[in-house]
């Protein structure tokens, strides 16, 4: 799912309009080649958007330009191209994202760039969680609440494996039932270990954060076996975000 489809369409339409407005100048010194702009800017966008006929029309224009490229001809070609784009857009469907959910959408959160919800440090310390963090945010934005919780479950699984290594115990997620009761019991069983006592505040707060994740999950296990509404998914999203921020202060992959 391309959540930036509308932006790509806008960018392509602006480029075609710009070419038409400057048809007389595009081959003069200081201006990019008319054919190059079509080939290198408009064609890739039309292809990426999977428009039915626009890419073919652009290629036809590029072929024609080899022998016939007066300014008036260029404008005619571009008017025909605009018509083709409008016809293609009839087949494009959009998903409305409420303004309150736009905050979940951010591009390029690869390290070391900023990540609003989970934080740069989480992405740096848990790079393997990047995909599921991104997908959880996209699902929150587009109203796929249960799918959001599924991706958050995968983030928590990764956190539990790292925590197991940190406490030098068997992988907690190997419990086939993935019972929250057993998971929390196995974590808290280490409260008197040398590792725990050396970083007591960190591990006690960590345990509290895991409980905060468990409470809104409303399942006895980590499996996503029920449907979630916006409020439920949002509560889990914020709980997992807080948990991961805390873990990233001391441990990571």
Image (cartoon, helix red, strand yellow):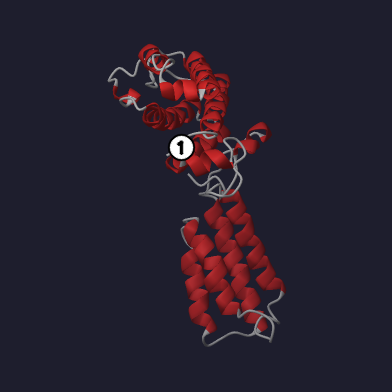
Q: Residue at x 61, y 45 (%)?
A: 114
Residue 75 place in picture, x, y as percent:
65, 75
Residue 151 shows up from this direction: yes
Quadrant in the picture for residue 140: top right
Q: Residues within 10 Å of mark 1 (few under 14, many from 20)?
A: many
Residue 61 appears at what percent x and percent y?
Answer: 52, 75
Front position in the image: 157 or 7: 157
Report if residue 51 is visible in the image: no
**Residue 52 in picture, x, y percent from top left:** 46, 58
Residue sitting at x 63%, y 85%: 70
Q: Nearer the viewer, residue 52 or 95?
A: 95
Q: Nearer the viewer, residue 144 or 130?
A: 130
Q: Residue at x 55, y 21 (%)?
A: 201
Q: Is residue 92 left or right of residue 33?
A: left
User: Which of these two is toward me, 177 or 140?
Assistant: 177
Secondary structure of residue under mark 1: loop
Residue at 35% over, 13% down: 182
Instruction: Give residue 77's quadrant in the image.
Output: bottom right
Residue 91 higher or lower than 159, as above or below: below
Tell how many labels: 1
Image quadrant where one finds the C terminus: top left
Position of 87 relative to 242 (above/below): below
Percent from the top left, x then y, of residue 202?
Answer: 53, 24
Q: Which residue is mark 1?
A: 252
User: Up-down: is 63 above or below 204?
Assistant: below
């Amino acid at each position: 799912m391309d959540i930036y489809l509308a932006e790509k369409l806008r960018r392509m339409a602006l480029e075609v309009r710009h070419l038409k407005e400057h048809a007389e100048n595009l081959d003069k010194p200081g201006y990019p080649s008319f054919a190059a702009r079509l080939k290198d800017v408009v064609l890739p966008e039309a292809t990426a958007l999977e428009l039915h006929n626009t890419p073919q029309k652009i290629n036809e224009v590029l072929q024609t330009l080899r022998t016939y490229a007066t300014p008036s001809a260029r404008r005619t070609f571009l008017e025909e191209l605009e018509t083709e784009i409008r016809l293609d857009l009839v087949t494009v469907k959009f998903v409305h994202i409420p303004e309150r959910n736009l905050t979940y959408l951010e591009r390029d959160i690869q390290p070391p760039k900023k990540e609003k919800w989970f934080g740069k440090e989480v992405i740096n310390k848990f790079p393997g969680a990047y995909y599921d963090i991104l997908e959880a945010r996209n699902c929150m934005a587009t109203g796929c609440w249960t799918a959001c919780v599924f991706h958050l479950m995968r983030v928590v699984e990764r956190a539990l494996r790292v925590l197991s290594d940190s406490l030098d115990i068997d992988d907690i997620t190997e419990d086939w039932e993935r019972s929250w009761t057993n998971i929390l019991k196995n974590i808290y069983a280490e409260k008197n270990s040398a590792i725990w006592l050396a970083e007591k505040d960190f591990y006690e707060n960590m345990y509290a954060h895991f409980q905060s994740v468990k409470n809104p999950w409303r399942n006895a296990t980590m499996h996503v076996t029920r449907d979630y509404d916006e409020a439920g998914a949002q509560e889990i999203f914020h709980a997992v975000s807080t948990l991961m921020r805390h873990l990233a202060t001391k441990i990571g992959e």
